[in-house]
Amino acid sequence: MYTVDSEQSWFYAYGLANIAAGGSSILLPLYALHLGADAGGVGLLAAAASVVSIPASILWGNLSDRWKVRKLFIALGFLGISASFVLMALTKSLFWLILVNGFFSLWWIASASLATVMIIEREEKVHWESKIALFNFVVSLGWLMGLVIGFGWSGFSTSLFTKELSFLSLFLLFGFVSSGAFIVSVLLIPEKSKFNIKSIRAPILVRGALTTERFRYLPSRIYFILSPGKLVSTLKKVSPELNYFLVSVVLSFTGFAIFFVPLPVWLKESLELSDDVIFFLFIINALANTIFNNRAGSIIKNLGNTKAVVLSLISRIILFPAIFIPLVFKATTLTIVGIGVVLFLIGISWTVINIGNSVFLANLTSTKLKGQVFGIYNGAIGLSGVFGALMGGFIAKFSGYLGSLICASLLITGGIVFFSKSARPKDKPDQITNNF
């Protein structure tokens, strides 16, 4: 059972921010469609935000280290997020929505990139895992609550307002919640940290894992992916098996993004589902992430790490195209239930892949290189998101969503092939927590 004490009360600021981020993760593509975007435009919207986030992570991290300030950048980040939602409410074109979403991503990273740093700097090493798990629970719950708010407001507001006012009011609501995150951060985030960044850099990189697949909480630092010299130097020091694994990650995660980015477009335009139903379906997916995130370790322990990851990847090859199967039902309710079941199972597979990959990577990497390798791993995931968003959007635009699903499954198949070329490390789900 997770319990937040006074020392970790500042986690609530991130929980509030993730209410806004979770709700906006679906609100933004729906609003883009309202403004006249197609699948390609929605893909560009997602890709542009990811592109901004990568250099922003470097910028805020370096400024924070140089000026020895944490609280200021976190609070400013939340304030910038709040302002971004107000600007989104005033945006009337796709072009400006893309720019404002990039502005949002810039400020989001200002706060998100420092969360793991704050925990590791302030907590004793023996408490790192439990405190980061608690933090992840708080922000995942916030993300889920944001989707629930989007679901409730989309269904309720349409009976009172025009479509335009419904979007505007929800953006303003998330802006208000984000301002609450700013206030909580000012009141509760500790003023001082240890600022011993060199000694904690590797643990930060290793523990900067994602919890929810559509999570905006990106890797805390992406040093090596933007430095060709460091990247090449590190890759030369690792085994061929590890390089195969990283190729597998790029292929698989690109496939994941190709599936998810155009999904709201397909649900809206092809199935003609209402906004509240689309929010509901993503609630089901996020709920699976939340419920099974802590159970994934047991699944990995029972099946073995390698087998668990491979089976989860195979399940996605099957589940992604399977989202079309519920369409055989003429009744809309049965169709929605069927899609919900598929998305729930996809959410379960994510928890195993996310944790299993981290364990697999830790087992393949020496302690000395662990920080560098996890930096490359996190950077590869970030870049895969960019490529997958662009590919998914434009493949769906020109060949339909089925074409995106086929492309996603083919890329994941390629990921499994390269994964199979990796070494088979001993299946120790807890090894990642014992190497520091």
Image: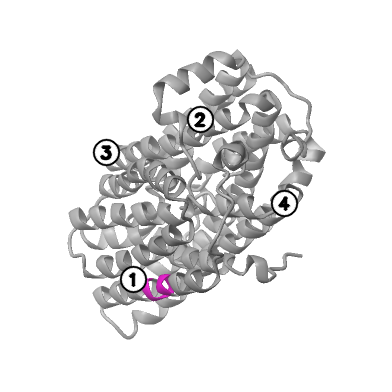
Question: Viewer-nearest of labels 4 and 1?
Answer: 4
Question: Viewer-nearest of labels 3 and 2?
Answer: 2
Could you say which is closer to the camera, residue 63 or residue 397? 63
Q: Residue 307 in the image: x percent, y percent?
A: 72, 31
Mark closest to the chain's N terminus, 1 or 2: 1
Q: Which residue is mark 2?
A: 376
Mark closest to the chain's N terminus, 3 or 1: 1
Which element is circle 4 on?
loop
Asked if the residue at tag 1 contacts the one at tag 4, i.e. Cβ–Cβ closer than 8 Å, the answer is no
Could you say which is closer to the camera, residue 279 or residue 185? 185
Image quadrant of residue 80?
bottom left
Q: Main secondary structure of the magenta part?
A: helix
Asked if residue 178 is among those painted magenta in the image, a careful observer would answer: yes
Say what amino acid the circle numbered 1 marks: Phe
Mark closest to the chain's N terminus, 4 or 1: 4
Mark closest to the chain's N terminus, 3 or 4: 4
Which element is circle 1 on?
helix
Question: Which residue sits at x=39%, y=76%?
Answer: 176
Q: Is residue 411 left or right of residue 53?
A: right
Asked if the residue at tag 4 contacts the one at tag 2, i.e. Cβ–Cβ closer than 8 Å, the answer is no
- Residue stretch in magenta: 175-179
**Circle on res. 253:** none
Say what amino acid the circle numbered 3 marks: Phe
Tell me the distance, in whole angstroms, between the alpha carbons under discs 4 and 1: 39 Å
